[in-house]
Image: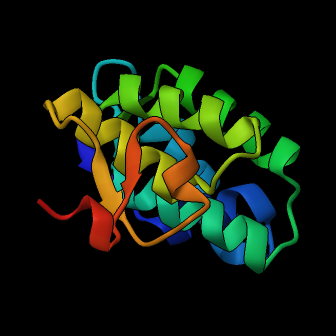
């Protein structure tokens, strides 16, 4: 297996640099197989969503569709796929950003009761708890 960095996925998806896009395509089509898959870790997923939103103006729907395709690709392995999919469901609902969803879901699956945060939007999710003076034991 070999890890895949965010920039390789961005070039492949956006084709904003023709030379690098072609190299990324060749790598993903020829070097990544079901027997020897490429690995996408959770940091790459968070970076990918952020870059597609901020730099390329992808909509939440476009990003959701893109991640779903990546998750179904047999030539790729997603780190903690259960958490990645659960986070995607929360992201799709528009209740939080993908990174926060993945942090909360990942921590819950690790056994955390919840994740404390100062982020009021994230605190609306079941996976989080707002940290304020009343919540400190």
Specify whether residue 93 is in view.
Answer: yes
Of the pair 74 and 71, the residue shown nearer to us: 71
Name which quarter of the figure residue 44 lies in.
bottom left
Q: Which residue is drawn at 70% across and 46% down?
A: 95
Quarter of the picture holding the N terminus: top left
Q: Which residue is drawn at 53% across and 56% down?
A: 122
Q: Residue at x 66, y 43 (%)?
A: 91
Q: Is residue 71 above or below residue 10?
A: above
Of the pair 1 and 107, the residue shown nearer to us: 107
Residue lying farthest front?
A: 134
Question: What's the image's color scheme?
Answer: rainbow
Quarter of the picture holding the C terminus: bottom left
Q: Which residue is drawn at 34% across and 31% down?
A: 37
Q: In this view, does 17 lie above or below 128?
A: below
Whole-percent x and y of residue 43?
37, 60
Whole-percent x and y of residue 10?
64, 65
Give left or right: position of 85 versus 95. left
Give left or right: position of 115 versus 112. right
Whole-percent x and y of residue 32?
41, 36
Of the pair 131 and 24, the residue shown nearer to us: 131
Name which quarter of the figure residue 84 lies in.
top left
Give left or right: position of 104 versus 46. left
Whole-percent x and y of residue 70?
59, 34
Q: Is residue 121 above or below residue 88?
A: below
Specify whether residue 27 is in view.
Answer: no
């Amino acid at each position: 297996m070999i890890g895949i960095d965010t920039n390789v996925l961005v070039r492949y998806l956006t084709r904003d640099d023709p030379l690098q896009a072609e190299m990324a395509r060749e790598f993903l089509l020829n070097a990544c197989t079901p027997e020897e898959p490429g690995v996408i870790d959770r940091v790459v997923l968070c970076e990918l969503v952020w870059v597609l939103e901020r730099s390329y103006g992808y909509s939440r729907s476009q990003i959701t569709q893109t991640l779903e395709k990546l998750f179904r690709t047999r030539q790729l392995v997603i780190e903690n796929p259960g958490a990645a999919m659960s986070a995607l469901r929360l992201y799709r609902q528009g209740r939080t950003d993908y990174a926060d969803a993945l942090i909360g879901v990942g921590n819950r699956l690790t056994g955390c009761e919840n994740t404390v945060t100062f982020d009021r939007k994230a605190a609306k999710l079941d996976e989080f708890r707002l940290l304020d003076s009343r919540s400190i034991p």
